[in-house]
Image: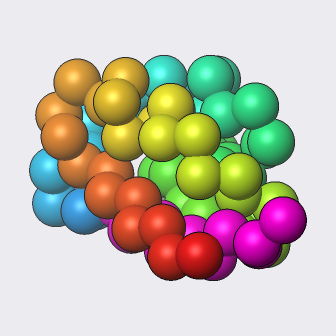
Amino acid sequence: MPVKVCAVTIDQAVCKQCGICVAFCPKDVLVADKEGQVEVAYLEECSGCLMCELLCPELAINVDIAE
């Protein structure tokens, strides 16, 4: 089975720090700091499920998947 390689980018200028992406990521790839700033902490764990991208109300997240 091919390995998925993902690139997750967050547009910080658009992100409203709601935390939905952090809450719904099944692999805990995303984390938020004390101020709510979201960052990609464990990219190697990303399965490419697109939950963060699909649930972001501001469309601030983009997931690119290559196999």
The x and y percentages for residue 37 are: 48, 52
The x and y percentages for residue 60 are: 24, 49
Return the residue nearer the eye: 13 or 4.
4
Q: Is residue 44 above or below residue 15?
A: below
The residue at the point 55 percent across, 61 percent down is 39
Quarter of the image containing the N terminus? bottom right
The x and y percentages for residue 46 are: 71, 57
Return the residue nearer the eye: 21 or 67.
67
Q: Which quadrant holds residue 43?
A: bottom right
- Report if residue 12 is visible in the image: yes
Q: Verify whether residue 9 appears in magenta.
A: yes
Q: Is residue 23 left or right of residue 50?
A: right
- Report if residue 35 is visible in the image: no
The residue at the point 23 percent across, 24 percent down is 57
Return the residue nearer the eye: 57 or 34.
57
Q: Is residue 40 left or right of residue 26?
A: left
Quarter of the image containing the C terminus? bottom right
Scheme of image coloration = rainbow
Q: Verify whether residue 11 appears in magenta.
A: no
Q: Magenta region, mostly helix, strand or loop? A: strand
Outermost residue, front side: 1
How many marks the image carries: the answer is 0
Q: Is residue 52 above or below residue 66?
A: above
Q: Is residue 16 left or right of residue 6?
A: left
The x and y percentages for residue 4 are: 67, 69
Q: Which quadrant holds residue 53?
A: top left
The residue at the point 50 percent across, 76 percent down is 66
Q: Which residues are magenta?
A: 1-10
